[in-house]
Amino acid sequence: MSGSSQVRRWQERRRNFNPSKAGFTLVEMLVVLAIMGLLVGLVAPRVFNQLADAKVRTAKIQVETLKNALDLFALDMDRYPSSAEGLNALIARPAGSGSWNGPYLKASALPRDPWNNAYVYRAPGESGRPFEISSLGPHGHEGGGGGLPEIRSW
């Protein structure tokens, strides 16, 4: 194709171009943006609620796993770890514990709750229970809050 034929084709396209028929109008763009805003406003809260529920379920499962590991520890040691020993007794031998048969967790480190806080362990627990495990939740301090239920082992 020669250079002059390319120039002629370009000039012909320029003559046939109608700016009023090209692109989108401002009104069309605003309508699309309004529809997108409505969709985001309706869908986003549901997605965030599902995420929060998933974190609560994950924390409850982790607490159950820790409870099971503590029961195995108690079977071997005839006692639950003290508050001073804490949950670390599940992965590292406490001092002066000859019958420790751990580690009682598969992971080499203690799990953290879904909000990246350490689980709180107390022995003895409330109401005469041998221990209690709880999550600090998204707010990072004890007690309920943040719109989520408190996650405890009992």
Image (cartoon, helix red, strand yellow):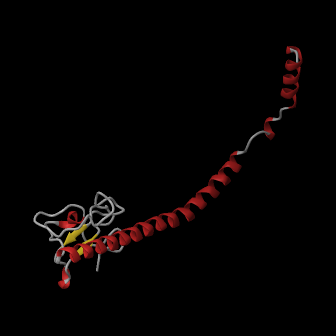
Q: Residue at x 44, y 70 (%)?
A: 53
Does 138 appear above or below 21?
below
**Residue nearest the observer in this picture, 92 or 39:** 92
Quarter of the view holding residue 86:
bottom left
Q: Residue at x 74, y 41 (%)?
A: 23
Residue that sits furthest to the top in the current view: 3
Question: Could one spot residue 147 in this view of the protein?
Answer: no
**Residue nearest the observer in this picture, 96 or 62:** 96
The reply, left or right, for residue 23 in relation to residue 11 is left
Q: Residue at x 15, y 64 (%)?
A: 94
The reply, left or right, for residue 11 in relation to residue 79 is right
Quarter of the view holding residue 31:
bottom right
Does 64 appear above or below 29?
below
Q: Position of residue 150 (x, y in %)?
A: 31, 74
Question: Could one spot residue 109 in this view of the protein?
Answer: yes
The reply, left or right, for residue 128 in relation to residue 6 is left
Residue that sits furthest to the bottom in the current view: 127
**Residue nearest the observer in this picture, 143 or 37:** 143
Which quarter of the rendered picture does the C terminus lie within? bottom left
Q: Position of residue 22 (x, y in %)?
A: 78, 39
Q: Position of residue 1 (x, y in %)?
A: 88, 18
